[in-house]
Image (spheres, rainbow, N blue to C red):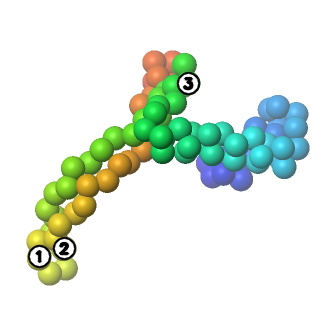
């Protein structure tokens, strides 16, 4: 499912226009993004938790040349499914 299909499903289920569903989804994504940038987590009971994880710097290899390269440390978004979502799969 892509974003357009999700927007169509939300609009159909909620009885709203696709424009309103798009605005709602964009607002949700923005709220989660801002919260994660602050280093906090977003918990949706029954669905799951969005959080930030730190990856340490490490050495890797260039697959074409085999040369060692340094990979910088960075923060990444992480999602852990809740019990109810896991049970439905």
Q: Which residue is mark 2?
A: 63
Tag 3 or tag 1, which sits nearer the N-term?
3
The disc at residue 30 is none
Instruction: Kindly give the residue lying farthest to the front in the view shown.
Output: 38
Contact between marks 3 and 2 (CB within 8 A): the answer is no
User: From the viewer's perspective, is 46 left or right of 40?
Assistant: right
Mark closer to the chain start, 3 or 2: 3
Crowd tier of the residue under label 1, counting other residues whose Cα lies within 10 Å: few below 14, some 14–19, many 20 or above: few
Q: Position of residue 42 (x, y in %)?
A: 52, 30
Q: Residue furthest bottom?
A: 65
Q: Nearer the viewer, residue 13 or 74?
A: 74
Marks 2,1: beta carbons within 8 A: yes
- Circle 3 Cα neighbour tier, 10 Å, few/some/many (<14 / 14–19 / ≥20): few
Please tell me in which quadrant of the rendered image residue 14 appears.
top right
Disc 1 designates what residue? 66
Dividing the picture into quadrants, the one containing residue 27 is: top right
Q: Which residue is mark 3?
A: 44
Q: Is residue 28 left or right of residue 63?
A: right
Q: Which mark is nearer the camera, 1 or 3?
A: 3
- The answer, for residue 78, to whether it is visible in the render is no
Seen from the viewer's position, the closer of residues 66 and 56 is 56
- The x, y position of residue 41, in whole percent, is 47, 31
Identified at 21% across, 50% down, the residue is: 56
Q: CA distance from mark 2 to mark 1?
A: 5 Å
What residue do we see at 80% from left, 32% from top? Answer: 13
Mark 1 element type: loop
Frontmost residue, 23 versus 54: 54
Report how far apart the C-alphas of labels 1 and 3 lie in the structure.
43 Å
């Amino acid at each position: 499912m892509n974003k357009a299909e999700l927007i169509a499903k939300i609009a159909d289920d909620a009885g709203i226009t696709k424009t309103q569903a798009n605005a709602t989804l964009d607002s949700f994504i923005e709220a989660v993004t801002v919260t994660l940038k602050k280093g906090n987590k977003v918990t949706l009971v029954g669905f799951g938790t969005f959080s930030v994880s730190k990856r340490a710097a490490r050495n890797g290899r260039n697959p074409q040349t085999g040369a060692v390269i340094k990979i910088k440390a960075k923060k990444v978004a992480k999602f852990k499914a809740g019990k109810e979502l896991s049970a439905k799969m």
